[in-house]
Amino acid sequence: MLNIQTFDARAGGNVIYKALAHPLAAEGIARVYAGLTGPVALYDPDHIAEALLAMYPLRVDSLFVHDVNEVGQVRAGTTTQPLTGLPDSGAKTVLVAAFDAARIIERIAGLLPAGARVTSLDEIRLPAEMISVRARYLDKLNFATNYAFFRDAEGLSTRLVSANYWANYGAGPMRLWLRLFGGDGRVLATWEQPLPSAAGGFSIDSRAVRKRFGLGDFTGQLFVHAIGAAGHDVVKYALDTYASDTGASLSCTHDANAWPSDRFAGLPAPHVGERVVLWLQNSHAVPIPAGTVALDRMGAERPVTLDQEVGPFATVALDVAAMLPHLRWPAQIEVRTGRHVVRPRYEVTQRNRTRIAHVNVERDNLKADPGIPTLPAALGRGYLLPFPILPRARFRSIFQPTPMATTQANLPIRLDVFDRGGGKVAERFLGRLPRLHDLALDFDDIDVEAGHAELVYDFRDGGEADGWLHALFRYEDRVSGHAAESSFGAHIFNTVMTYRDEPQSYSGPPPGLSTRLFLKLGDAGRRSFAVLIYPASAAWHAVSSTSLQLFDSEGRMIAESPVPIACSGSAMVWPHEIFGEAALARAGSGGYVLVRDPKVRLFGYHGLMDDAGGFSLDHMFGF
């Protein structure tokens, strides 16, 4: 496992990791290492050494710390020594593992061995013009970065869509620094893209990138760095995969999450007639050693390893059936990556149609919360996981609970089903599911035409809970055979009472709940839609105050329409029906819809649909 820490409260979240993992930092490290003259002493004032040496291996001759309680520890294979021993170390180079290190270097100048040269991580800093907050390099806003699966090959293209939501937080001029890596990890292109001055929409299309840089087929990853960020350090986006050769494929997936994990879950085994490929993308400049990556049936604890090295920033297609040949849907697969990748994508091919979806981070730092089974009545049903049931006449809706923490030995759960008006039409206790289960519930077995369902905890047979409740949702067109799938986790929704950090809100602390959801517009014969759900753990407003606001590519609102939703109800909305084609034309290619509610936290799923039976669906993001 790569010995990195992606969250550190002392360092401000995962900012140190992101500072080290940046592709330009990798280039800087290579230059710094090339200039080192041994013996090399490393001084580690900010607890960076382990991450630094894990991501960029280097043999150091001695390792120094100033905290007496840390002397004698083993970091990256080297035992720490007291900083007072530095003068006698014989080092020719002293590397200070810190950013903004000028004062540190000044203070230890008297401890340097005679003739030793001192350097620091300031040598790998990003160029000044890429820094959003210049007063402090390790400010999280300086590393508003993310990755995207990016492909233009074999008749399939990708389009990243988002908006300049940083403008809503007072950001000035914004631009993106972009680097495209090919399948072998080589840099195919590096460029910048300015963003609208206000909260306008933008897109990055693989066909346009391919044409601009004269590229051939590629399947790799796009690194995105937002420069000038304010208020928000996460790059959020929707990613469409579409057939550029008039084929039938169409899918949508959410942003990648910007940090790596040891394990991921929510990967389905292939159904009969399906091929499932996991796109493994190395997020770092150090190779993934052979034997590090493994697939395992969830709960089986019999992992099968990939006996292949994956190069820096490279992309590898793993055929699930080649590694787990006897496993079939509805079995679920756990992905072990040793913290080398951010959230991977998987691709399912069936009947010459493909769909892309993502796995989710499987937590390794959770334990059962004894408070959840005894939540007071004021919190009602507590944690809810809402998801849509698409119109039954056309679509088949299926769901699977997915263990999403290494400590989840059982899932005590129930399904509550609601029609669009908020009426509860069914309830089904699913039991205390073991970690290794194969439940896949088809909503054809439940009498509801359209609406939504909510997965909730139910302890009538005992069991434990940690609040990290997840499920995978699959939707199939009964005529075309096209399918889409998504996944998400539970929260406490729409109650004035709070428990720990729930309910969450897209704007402001609870109980000041509100909604700001991004809905992209359609293109080239594909119409966008969303299923908006008003889940409520306890009694809340009888009807939401939801409105749809249509913005153009410059961030100007050009139309608004109310969409009231009943408590525990849902609505399927189509921008072309609500605003009309003329208004959508005024919004332009960078236009989008903002789903706004000042009093209710909605949850939503969005996608595209064409006339050939193709459609996409994934959960929405807010800002």
Image: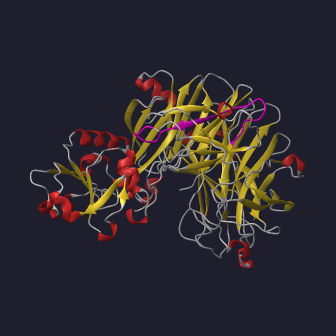
Magenta part, dominant SS: loop
Q: What color scheme is it?
A: secondary structure
Q: Is residue 150 above or below residue 443?
A: above
Q: For the point 41% across and 29% down, which residue is it?
A: 186
Q: Is residue 404 above or below residue 175?
A: below
Q: Is residue 439 above or below residue 510?
A: above
Report whether residue 171 is seen.
Answer: no
As for residue 282 lying within the magenta part, the answer is yes
Q: Position of residue 425 (x, y in %)?
A: 87, 60
Q: Position of residue 314 (x, y in %)?
A: 47, 33
Give the tally of numbered discs. 0
Closest to the observer: 449 or 457?
A: 457
Q: Position of residue 251 (x, y in %)?
A: 65, 37
Closest to the observer: 222 or 495?
A: 222
Q: For the point 15% across and 59% down, which residue is it?
A: 87
Closest to the observer: 539 or 397?
A: 397
As for residue 120 lying within the magenta part, the answer is no
Magenta stretch in the rendered image: 268-287
Report whether residue 494 is seen.
Answer: yes
> Is residue 73 found left or right of 463 in the rendered image?
left
Q: For the point 39% across and 46% down, which residue is it?
A: 55
Q: Position of residue 172 (x, y in %)?
A: 36, 53
Query: In the picture, residue 569 is in which quadrant?
Result: bottom right
Query: In the picture, residue 349 is in which quadrant?
Result: top right
